[in-house]
Amino acid sequence: MRITFEIWMQDGPSDAGRLVTHTVDEVEPDMSLLEALDHVNAGRIARGERVVEFDHDCREGICGTCGLVVDGRAHGPHEGTTTCQLYLRSFHDGARIVVEPFRSAAFPVVRDLKVDRSALDRVARAGGFVSTHIRTAPEANSIPIARADAEASFAAAACIGCGACVASCKNSAASLFTAAKIEHLGRLPQGRVESTERVLDMVAAMDDEGFGHCTNTEACEAVCPQAISTDVIASLNRRYLWARLETLGRRRV
Amino acid sequence: MLPDAKIPPGPIEQKWSQYQATCRLVNAANRHRLQIVVIGTGLAGAGAASALGELGYRVKAFSFHDSPRRAHSVAAQGGVNAAKNYQNDGDNVYRMFYDAVKGGDFRSREANVYRMAELSVDLIDTCVAQGVPFAREYGGVLANRSFGGVQVERTFYAQGQTGQQLLLGAYNALNRQVAAGQVELFSRHELLDLVLVDGRAAGVIVRDLVTGELERHAAHAVVLATGGYAKIFYLSTLAMGSNATAIWKAHRRGALLANPSFVQVHPTSLPPLGSHQSKLTLMSESLRNDGRIWVPAKAGDERPPNDISEDERDYYLERRYPAFGNLTPRDVASRAGKERIDAGHGVGPLKNAVYLDFKDAIAADGRDAIESRYGNLFRMYAKITGLDAYREPMRIAPAAHFSMGGLWVDYELMTSIPGLYALGECNFADHGANRLGANSLLQACIDGYFILPCTIGNELAGRFREPLVPTDHPAFEEAARAVQGEIERLLAMRGTRTVDEIHRELGSVLTDRCGISRSAAGLQAAIEDVRRLRAEFETDVCVTGGAHEPNSELEKALRVRDYLELGELMCRDALERNESCGMHYREEHCTEDGDPVRNDERFAHVAAWEYGPDGAFVRHEEPLTFEFVRTAARSYR
């Protein structure tokens, strides 16, 4: 196959950045897009140029490290797929593929296709946990959990934290990410104890990090590699409303 | 030279409680005076950092990823074992201990393995309390399934994402301690050297992977939780960034490395599709609960699988191992698969795979039941191969997966360097010559959550008055200068070979000669090949870009350089172990049926290697004694 890549290159956060063209032959349909980028980089090394920087690790769709906007869509053309699970067989011979980073004001570019998503870690840190001491735990089966709740919790917990939802949202909202974490814990009896504080603190953290507000376009769900449903955002809104009502008149520390 | 393993005396079921009752502790009021550095934020590292933070120690946690949640623990699919006996099928702690010792082919320490089984019970409680969404029955209680090498159902799971869910539990606990100010987190930082003062671990040199600056961090104790090194084979199920650099730097500074050749090859990975391949994807062992493995009975049969009738199929695991069938341990299943492929029965375009067939399970339980158990794995298979495993069998093949070998540690998980600990996959402690499925998540969790937080007190008690070594100490200066020099040398070389090319060749040498099957002649040749590759790397590698900027090519080069030294030691270790045990299969030592033959008289020991420059490694032996199990030839027939 012959593929022409238009790759976003940007030395650092203050550089303007530009698309750089690379045409590669000798790539095959069974090659992943990231393997094709490896191939591009091998060519750059042979010419003495620095490599194109991009984040990747497990290359099997679970670590959430990779994340590229491919032809204008986060993680490329397929649903329920991470960038590393995108293969060249999805493109025709002679295709031109535009590769850009996940863009958001809350995700500053580190270099080229690498962005800084630590804002998501800080949102998670604002309450995305159960305040249990390690080893302070009752017998596991003493907390029966309805299978439907366990499955709903798992479906939300499946979020891999890649940030595609943010990159695809016209408001750069992190609502799907944040709501997934809140739903994961809020569906379980262990997580319900701190539910009120969690939802208020995590929503506040989301605002502090510069993420926008959700306006229900659901672009996030369309690109989510784990197909997390926007139902979790509806649930977040309900939980947030209740939490605000519950704490009315109570001064938050 | 080999330190005492510090195994507590007494009956095996009392050793750990005996240790806990008598070890020294650090008073809660003094813990904040002690600084601990943790390298790696996977299950073991994040677990240790959060547990130490909860106890009140000052902790710095480092990860080369952009977020601690990316660590490769995330990729473990199938589950985590615990001797809960929820299924009423005869399980208990001793049985779980025995299964793991036998599964490891009697090359692990009894006391360590027993403790792992013992602590498994508490681990499930802890994870459930953290909100890990394990699979459940309709009545609301936890569900279990079975894994290779055992005859009970003791595996807890969260669909095919158990590692991801356990890691999120640890990540959440870590976040809680970061928010509380107990743990300071350094993402995109990689360890490049360990600093020793008066023979003790005194700190680390790390590189900020964004600015390229070298940083010095002093500590009262250093904890390595840096995962496994099977990526040395290049094609493996490990993540691209998984590396041996931290353990190799520790090894060069004097930490012994134990059984480095013990690397597990997993039987159910996806086969390579071509020469461009950068990694292999695992298909969970749990699939062997319902999938049946077969090859065409006739060599070279190229018909599509569904055209091959039942009597023309060879279900070779069921035929050779009727007692365990498709659930034989990984080493047995991988060898049996390789034997069939080498005999010309391989399937797929490159004839390098075998079939894993769900036809009978779908007929018996229905497609919906299979989908609810393995839906995400079938989807993953379809994405990678473009094939539908509900309609035709999966094509699978063996791939390098897990390193049982690693830094030598004593019962306290301390390496041979005082003050330096190794947790999880980067130590050698619990799996002997072959790990059972769903014991890796278990070991990583208990090392970090339960064991280290107790044992580290025994070392640090009394040290809280000692100030940290200043980071301008000559030992820090020397280490930082050496790292800087190495980086500059690599960047200045501008040879003709890329790092990936050399890594690929190293992987191919090791896969052929130090993989599923090994021989003295092959290993000797491999040592020569690895040395040649190292010489090429040292004189002719090309690393572009600069030192003071993001440079992933430089990161890769520094890791591969360490792999090139480790590769030689792996071959040496395999060569000197003149027996077959677990996954270490020496062609010279097997029965007529191809079953491995152990030599307990000469090799019932751990080989602990001391570093020597240019291949001058020194081998030490820690004898293994079996007081609580009787050693026997492993049989799964």
Image (spheres, rainbow, N blue to C red):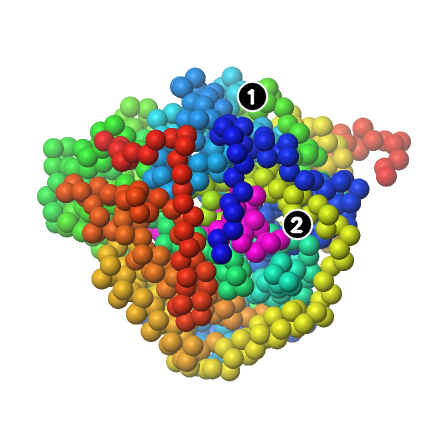
Please name the amino acid that badge 2 sits on: Asp
Residue B540 in the image: state x and y as whole percent.
Answer: 40, 80
In primary-sequence order, the first of circles 2 and 1 is 2
Please name the amino acid that badge 1 sits on: Asn
Tell me where residue B278 sits by quadrant: bottom left
Q: Is residue B210 left or right of residue B289?
A: right
Label 2 neighbourhood size at 10 Å, few (<14), some (14-19), many (20+)?
some
- Chain bearing tag 2 is A
Which residue appears at 48% of the width and 53% of the height? B2
Residue under pointer 1: A141
Q: Is residue B576 above or below residue A220?
A: below
Classify mark 1: helix, strand or loop.
Answer: helix
Tell me where residue B350 sits by quadrant: bottom left
Front residue (pair B180, B423): B423
Q: Is residue B456 a member of the stretch shown in magenta?
A: no
The range drawn in magenta is: B399-425
Residue under pointer 2: A121
